[in-house]
Image (tube, grey):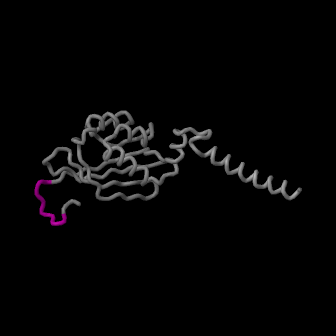
Amino acid sequence: MRPWIHLLGVVGGAVAAVGITFWSTSTTGPRGEIASALATRQMMEPKAVVEAFEHMAFDEYRPADAVAEYFSPDIVDHSQRIRGDYTSITELLQRLDWSNGNGPRRTISNIVAEGDIVMVHYHLVRETGTPGFSAVDIFRVENGMIVEHWEALQELPVESPNVHGAF
């Protein structure tokens, strides 16, 4: 009888350990969905954070939601068009009205990441019928949140002698 008791103790201990681990690390356990999402995002590579932000903001036309989800409340933005804080970023994106699909259009050419820095090179057309801009956004990511942003814009000419184009 004694071996069965030992076997039950070992199996019971293993099942309990697995169950407690699952319960404590899932959204049904002590961590709610928000805490679980934050922990998951903190484990994301910086490039994945920026790609998720770009997708939500510009492919799904939800820039305010994307800023709320992926930007630190203490973000430092170096854009010369705004004050450079969280509120001014949200205000700028809301003014551009991306929601109906008629706002500026972006076509990403390259995304490059090194350490906590991620650069997105893209073609930006703010007004239909214009050549637009060659643009680069540079993000610094910490713990799954965008904490710093820079931008560089180069207006594209209507005609250019360059046979390679901007992209």
21 sits left or right of 95 in the view? right
Closer to the camera, 83 or 108?
108
**Residue 159 position in % (x across, y down):** 10, 57
The relative height of residue 134 versus residue 77 in the rendered view (above or below) is below
What stretch of residues is rendered in magenta? 157-164
Closer to the camera, 36 or 134?
36
Give the residue furthest to the left: 159
Q: Is residue 77 magenta?
A: no
| Residue 148, quarter of picture | top left
Q: Quadrant of the C terminus?
A: bottom left
**Residue 27 position in % (x across, y down):** 56, 42
Q: Main secondary structure of the magenta part?
A: loop
Q: Is residue 162 magenta?
A: yes
128 sits left or right of 138 in the view? left
Closer to the camera, 145 or 161?
145
- Residue occupying the point 63% across, 44% down: 23
| Residue 11, quarter of picture | bottom right
Closer to the camera, 137 or 11?
11
**Residue 145 position in % (x across, y down):** 46, 45
Give the residue furthest to the bottom: 163
- Residue occupying the point 52% across, 51% down: 43
Q: Quadrant of the N terminus?
A: bottom right
**Residue 70 position in % (x across, y down):** 43, 43
